[in-house]
Amino acid sequence: MVTFLDTASLLDADEPAPFEIFNPGGQAPVLLVADHASNRIPRCLGGLGLSAADQQRHIAWDIGSADLTMSLSLLLNAPAVLCGYSRLVIDCNRLPGDPDSIPVSSDGTVVPGNCGLSEAGQEVRTTDIFNPYHQAVADTLAHMWRRCPTVPPALLSIHSFTPQLLSIKHPPRPWQVGILWNRDPRLAVPLMDGLRACDDGSCIGDNQPYSGRDIAFTVDRHAASAGLPHVGIEVRQDEIDTKDKAHVWACRLAEALGSLVGHPDVHRVCHY
């Protein structure tokens, strides 16, 4: 039996950083972020008591989102910030303290390493992973805006979703991609229009299978609060579960976003 102890530091010196900045020299006024890019678990947490198979499932990460983010980053010539650890360690798209921030179960699977975790144990995950990741997002946006003060940067939040949840008797999800937004239509509406114009038979979800009105911590914190243009993009995992498939979707998204990047009607401060 594994005992999960509170630790003063979550990451050993030889473990990867809490975030990766990809294509930092990208010149487009767009920042991509991937809150759930990795399924890595700090060594000291012993895999959170999960089987190797469960650590590969969608409960641990957004499958394909890292490949999609990096491919789209290169196509747009835009920087990206990717979280380096599993959403089960701490979900960087939730406010710390939210019960879903460090879930005790996900899609019907109990996460032993998160059960009975003390407040001190929760705080060290916030300090060592959540805070550095979000600071990297904030610092990168600030650098981009300082570099070009007349063109406020846009934020694209990249996620993926499982074709079907196991714990809830829902039918398979028909959408290949979902565009998540709340009040700001500047990117979301023309992006959906652009994807539909491809006429390739894809099913485009408007705030499906999740809604940007409900789950939007990262975009609210870094973009909506500052009046920056933003949108959430969710691609179904079986559409991007290989590098080649992820690149196909990156090309589709880049084409649909192409005329929006740098457009003065998009890149302005506006509070909705």
Image: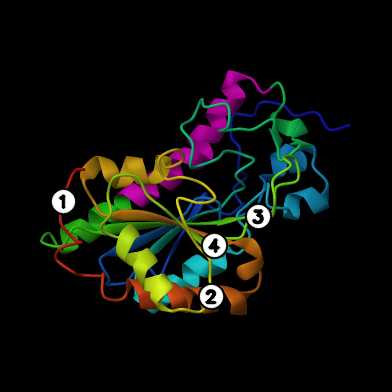
- What is the C-alpha distance between the residues marked 3 and 1? 34 Å
Mark 2 or 1: in front is 2
- Alpha carbon separation for disc pair 2 and 1: 35 Å
Q: Amino acid at mark 2?
A: Gly
Q: In the rendered structure, which segment of residues is drawn in magenta?
A: 117-138
Q: Does residue 68 sit above or below 138 in this rendering?
A: below
Asked whether, in this view, residue 156 is left or right of residue 112, the answer is left
Left or right: where 59 falls relative to 228 = right
Q: Nearest the camera: 172 or 6?
A: 172
| Residues at marks 4 and 1, CA–CA distance in whole angstroms | 28 Å
What amino acid type should be assigned to the residue bearing mark 4?
Val
The mark nearer the N terminus, 3 or 4, is 3
Crowding at dot 3, Cα within 10 Å, few <14 / some 14-19 / many 20+, comes out as some
Q: Residue furthest right?
A: 1
Residue drawn at (49%, 53%) of the image: 19
Disc ID at residue 235: 4
**Amino acid, disc 1:** Val
Q: Residue at x 24, y 59 (%)?
A: 153
Q: Nearer the viewer, residue 195 or 162?
A: 195
**Is residue 182 in sight in this rendering?**
yes
Q: In the structure shown, which secondary structural element does the residue marked by tag 2 occupy?
A: loop
Q: Position of residue 220 (x, y in %)?
A: 34, 41
Cβ atoms under marks 3 and 2 closer than 8 Å: no
Whether residue 63 sits left or right of residue 76 in the image: it is right
Q: Residues within 10 Å of mark 2 (few under 14, many from 20)?
A: few
Residue at mark 1: 269
The quadrant in which the N terminus is found is top right
Q: Nearer the viewer, mark 4 or mark 1?
A: 4
In this view, 29 is above or below 171: below
Q: Is residue 139 above or below residue 252?
A: above
| Cβ atoms under marks 3 and 1 closer than 8 Å | no
Q: Which residue was labeled with disc 3?
A: 162
